[in-house]
């Protein structure tokens, strides 16, 4: 089991899993905004996308600076911590907060914009699809190596 953990942690699968989890949670929040589009005094919510992207960039940077398995400076524990550590991806990144202020507020106190929400859902769906496809490709390569088809 430890060998499989090392195999997965030496790839980008843990980071892609974080992206998939983030986009799944964000999709829930954005669809909640659409569900409340006509609720008086409802303020749109969103996840901190810029903060998540910064955490992801930091994880990739740490991963690259530590090298790959077998190279000098690489250690399994450092790799696992850099890729999935709670210090890089705290739970606050997965909690909804009030969305950005919009210039238009309706008389019922709502700051709705169905066009904005649909656009954000579309961008989020694309990001999730890319993460899942990349994970799928890596897992297919691992399966080929394990079954000695490569």
Image: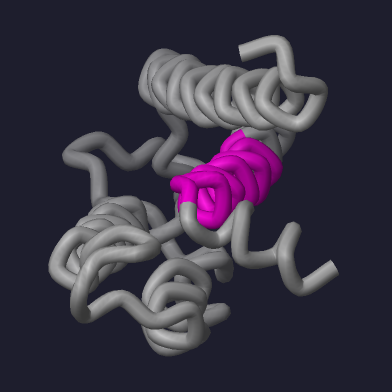
| Percent of width and height locating residue 96 | 54, 64
Q: Is residue 7 left or right of residue 15?
A: right
Residue 45 appears in the figure: no
In the image, residue 104 above or below residue 4: above
Q: Quadrant of residue 98?
A: bottom left
Residue 111 vertical placement versus 90 (above, below): above
Q: Is residue 20 magenta?
A: yes
* Residue 99 visible at all: yes
Image vertical order of residue 77 relative to residue 59, above or below = below
Quadrant of residue 88 in the image? bottom left
Q: Nearer the viewer, residue 138 or 2?
A: 2
Asked where in the image residue 139 lies, by quadrant, the reply is top right
Residue placed most toward the observer, 110 or 9:
9
Residue at the spot 73% in from the left edge and 20% down from the top edge: 148
Q: Is residue 74 above or below residue 78?
A: above
Region of the chain picked out in magenta, as a range:
11-30
Q: Nearer the viewer, residue 128 or 58?
A: 58
Figure disc tally: 0
Q: Main secondary structure of the magenta part?
A: helix
State the quadrant of the N terminus: bottom right
Image point 61% across, 22% down: which residue? 141
* Percent position of residue 135, x then y: 59, 31
- For the C terminus, the image quarter is top right
Image position of 7 (left or right of 54): right
Q: Is residue 55 left or right of residue 132?
A: left
Q: What percent of the width, then of the height, locates residue 123?
A: 40, 21
Instruction: Tell me: 69 left or right of 33.
Output: left
Picture residue at 26% right of the left edge, 57% below the top: 60
Q: How is the image coloured?
A: one colour
Q: Nearer the viewer, residue 4 or 135?
A: 4
Q: Position of residue 118 (x, y in %)?
A: 49, 17
- In reply to whether residue 38 is colored magenta, the answer given is no
């Amino acid at each position: 089991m430890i060998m499989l953990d090392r195999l997965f942690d030496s790839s980008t699968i843990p980071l892609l899993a974080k992206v998939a989890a983030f986009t799944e949670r964000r999709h829930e929040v954005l669809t909640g905004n659409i569900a409340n589009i006509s609720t008086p005094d409802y303020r749109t919510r969103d996840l901190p996308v810029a903060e998540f992207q910064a955490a992801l960039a930091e994880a990739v940077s740490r991963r690259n600076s530590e090298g790959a398995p077998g190279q000098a400076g690489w250690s399994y524990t450092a790799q696992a911590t850099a890729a999935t550590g709670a210090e890089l991806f705290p739970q606050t990144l997965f909690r909804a907060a009030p969305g950005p202020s919009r210039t238009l507020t309706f008389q019922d106190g709502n700051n709705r914009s169905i066009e904005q929400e649909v656009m954000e859902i579309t961008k989020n769906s694309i990001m999730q699809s890319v993460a899942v496809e990349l994970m799928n490709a890596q897992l297919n390569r691992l399966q080929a190596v394990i079954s000695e088809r490569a």
